[in-house]
C-alpha cells in the first residue's frame, strides 16, 4: 500500500491559497471564493490577447450554467450546508487514473486520456473537429500556463461527479488536485464516497471509493475491494 503526501498546487489566483486540506467551508464561503476567482481572472485577462480572453470568458463568468452558477444553486438549495476541501496528491492520479470525462458519450471517441498524454509528452497540439469542451487544447493550455482556477466541485455523494478534466490537467502538470466534497448533513467525521457507476470506470478499469477521515486527516483509496493507498494530510 502506498502512502501519498502533498506536493503543491499551481493556483491561477490567490483566492484559494488560504484554504488548507481538510478545512471545512460553508456553501456561502465556497460561493464567495468562486466570485473572487471570476473577479481576479477578469482583472488578469485585461493583459491577455483578445482571443485568449474570449476563450477564458466562456467559462469564467457569472452567467447561467457557469461554474459560479452551479455553486450558487447548491448554496441556495442547501443554505448553511458545508463542504470539505482536500488536496489529493497528484501522484495518486498519475498512478491510477486511466479515463476521463464521459466515456459513455460519442465525444469520447474524439480524444482519450491516453491520447492526451501522448500529445503532452510529444508537445503537440490537438483538435476536436470543431468541438470546444474540457478536452480542448486551449483548455489544457490555461492549466499549463496559468494554473487551476477552482477546485473540483464534487457536490454529490458519488465520485467523480464532474470535472475530471480539471483532475487530469492538474496531475498532468504535477499539481496536486484540489477537490470540494459535500459534507454529510450529520457532519460525521468519517464518511465514504460512492462510485459513480453512471460512468465507465476511470481508474484502471475499476471503480474508486474514498474513505475520508476528517479527524485524523486521512483518505483511504479503494479500487472496488482492494485497498490501494492512503493520503496523509
Image: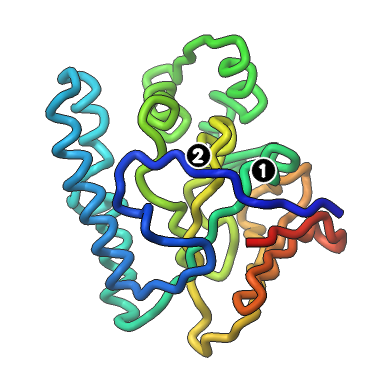
Q: Residues within 10 Å of mark 1 (few under 14, many from 20)?
A: some
Relative depth, front residue between 224 and 87: 87
- Give the percent coordinates (x, y) of residue 164: 53, 44
Q: Which residue is mark 1?
A: 93
- Residue 113 lies, with reference to residue 21, above or below; the image says above
- Check disc 2 and report its element: helix, strand or loop: helix
The reply, left or right, for residue 184 in relation to residue 4 is left
Q: Could you tell me which residue is drawn at 18 percent across and 18 percent down?
A: 49
Q: Residue furthest bottom?
A: 186
Relative depth, front residue between 89 and 106: 89
Q: Is residue 211 visible?
A: yes
Q: Which residue is mark 2?
A: 165
- Give the percent coordinates (x, y) of residue 162: 49, 52
Q: Could you tell me which residue is drawn at 63 percent across and 59 percent down?
A: 196
- Give the percent coordinates (x, y) of residue 132: 36, 28
- Check disc 1 and report its element: helix, strand or loop: helix
Q: Could you tell me which residue is drawn at 28 percent across and 64 percent down?
A: 31
Amino acid at each position: 500500500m502506498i502512502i501519498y503526501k502533498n506536493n503543491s498546487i499551481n493556483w491561477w489566483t490567490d483566492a484559494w491559497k488560504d484554504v488548507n486540506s481538510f478545512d471545512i467551508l460553508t456553501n456561502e464561503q465556497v460561493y464567495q471564493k468562486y466570485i473572487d476567482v471570476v473577479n481576479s481572472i477578469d482583472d488578469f485577462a485585461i493583459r491577455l490577447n483578445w482571443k485568449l480572453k474570449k476563450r477564458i470568458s466562456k467559462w469564467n463568468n457569472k452567467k447561467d450554467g457557469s461554474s459560479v452558477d452551479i455553486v450558487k444553486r447548491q448554496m441556495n438549495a442547501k443554505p448553511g450546508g458545508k463542504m470539505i476541501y482536500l488536496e489529493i496528491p497528484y501522484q495518486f492520479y498519475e498512478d491510477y487514473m486511466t479515463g476521463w470525462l464521459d466515456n459513455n458519450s460519442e465525444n469520447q471517441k474524439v480524444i482519450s486520456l491516453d491520447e492526451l498524454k501522448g500529445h503532452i509528452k510529444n508537445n503537440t497540439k490537438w483538435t476536436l473537429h470543431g468541438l470546444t469542451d474540457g478536452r480542448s487544447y486551449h483548455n489544457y493550455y490555461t492549466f499549463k500556463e496559468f494554473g487551476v482556477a477552482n477546485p473540483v466541485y464534487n457536490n454529490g455523494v458519488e465520485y467523480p461527479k464532474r470535472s475530471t478534466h480539471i483532475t487530469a490537467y492538474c496531475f498532468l502538470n504535477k499539481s496536486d488536485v484540489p477537490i470540494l466534497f459535500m459534507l454529510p448533513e450529520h457532519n460525521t467525521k468519517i464518511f465514504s464516497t460512492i462510485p459513480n457507476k453512471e460512468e465507465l470506470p476511470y481508474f484502471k478499469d475499476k471503480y474508486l471509493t474514498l474513505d475520508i477521515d476528517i479527524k485524523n486527516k486521512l483518505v483511504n483509496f479503494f479500487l472496488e475491494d482492494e485497498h490501494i493507498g492512503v493520503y496523509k494530510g
